[in-house]
Structures are given as structure tokens and as C-alpha cells.
């Protein structure tokens, strides 16, 4: 039994396909037939590009950037906890002085 291989498209291809629909006023159905891409896939690419133009359509040539590394998040959390502790102590000192 042969398995169907999934085609991966690059970011440039996806952006050009969406641009054909938006700027050249080709229909989604016509563009999908001409490019050999599913109708629903073109719709999804258009939605992703409208929602987040910078990180949309990662494709095979550009992966979506992760938000932050876990180590960075952990260090930030430690700094915030330390700052909170300092603020609690300062608040206690000022409250004590006002009595």
C-alpha cells in the first residue's frame, strides 16, 4: 500500500498564493486549482496572515520562533519573586513607621 506524502510549501509560496487572491482578485477556488493546493488550506493561510503577519505561515524555510526558552522564564520568575520579597519588607517597614 502506498502512502501519500505530504507536500510542504515554503513561506514565500504561501504569501504569494494569498497575494494572488487578495491583490489580483483571483478567486480562492481558481487559485487552489491553478496551484494544486486545497481550498481550505488557502483559506487558512489567508486567516493566519491576517491575524499575525510577522509570524504567520512558517513553512519549511522558516520555523515559528519560540516565545522564550524555559531557562529564561525561570530566571525571570526568580527575579520577580526576589523583587516581591524586597517590596514586602519595605512595605512592612513603612507601615511600622506610620504607627
Image (tube, rainbow, N blue to C red):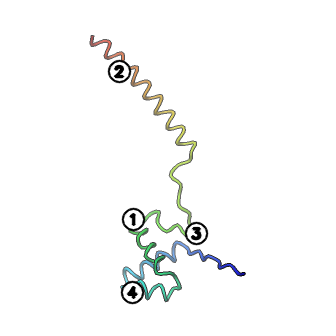
CA separation in Å, label 4 and label 2: 64 Å
Kindly identify which residue carries mark 2: 91
Q: Nearer the viewer, mark 3 or mark 1?
A: 1
Q: Residue at x 44, y 29 (%)?
A: 83
Q: Residue at x 52, y 42 (%)?
A: 73
- Quadrant of residue 50 in the image? bottom left
CA separation in Å, label 3 and label 2: 52 Å
Q: Secondary structure at mark 2?
A: helix
Q: Say if 29 sits above or below 8 in the image.
A: below
Q: Quadrant of the N terminus?
A: bottom right
Q: Earlier in the sequence, mark 4 or mark 1?
A: 4
Kindly identify which residue carries mark 3: 61
Q: Nearer the viewer, mark 4 or mark 3?
A: 4
Residue 26, disc: 4
Kindly identify which residue carries mark 1: 51
CA separation in Å, label 3 and label 1: 20 Å
CA separation in Å, label 4 and label 1: 21 Å
CA separation in Å, label 4 and label 3: 26 Å
Q: In the rendered view, does 32 fall on the left or right side of 25?
A: right
Q: Earlier in the sequence, mark 2 or mark 1?
A: 1
Amino acid at each position: 500500500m502506498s502512502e501519500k506524502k505530504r507536500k510542504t510549501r515554503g513561506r514565500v509560496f504561501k504569501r504569494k498564493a494569498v497575494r494572488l487572491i487578495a491583490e489580483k482578485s483571483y478567486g480562492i477556488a481558481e487559485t487552489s486549482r491553478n496551484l494544486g493546493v486545497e481550498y481550505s488550506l488557502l483559506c487558512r493561510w489567508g486567516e493566519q496572515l491576517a491575524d499575525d503577519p510577522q509570524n504567520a505561515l512558517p513553512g519549511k524555510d522558516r520555523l515559528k520562533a519560540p516565545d522564550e526558552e524555559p531557562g529564561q522564564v525561570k530566571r525571570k520568575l526568580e527575579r520577580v519573586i526576589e523583587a516581591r520579597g524586597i517590596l514586602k519588607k519595605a512595605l512592612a517597614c513603612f507601615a511600622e513607621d506610620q504607627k
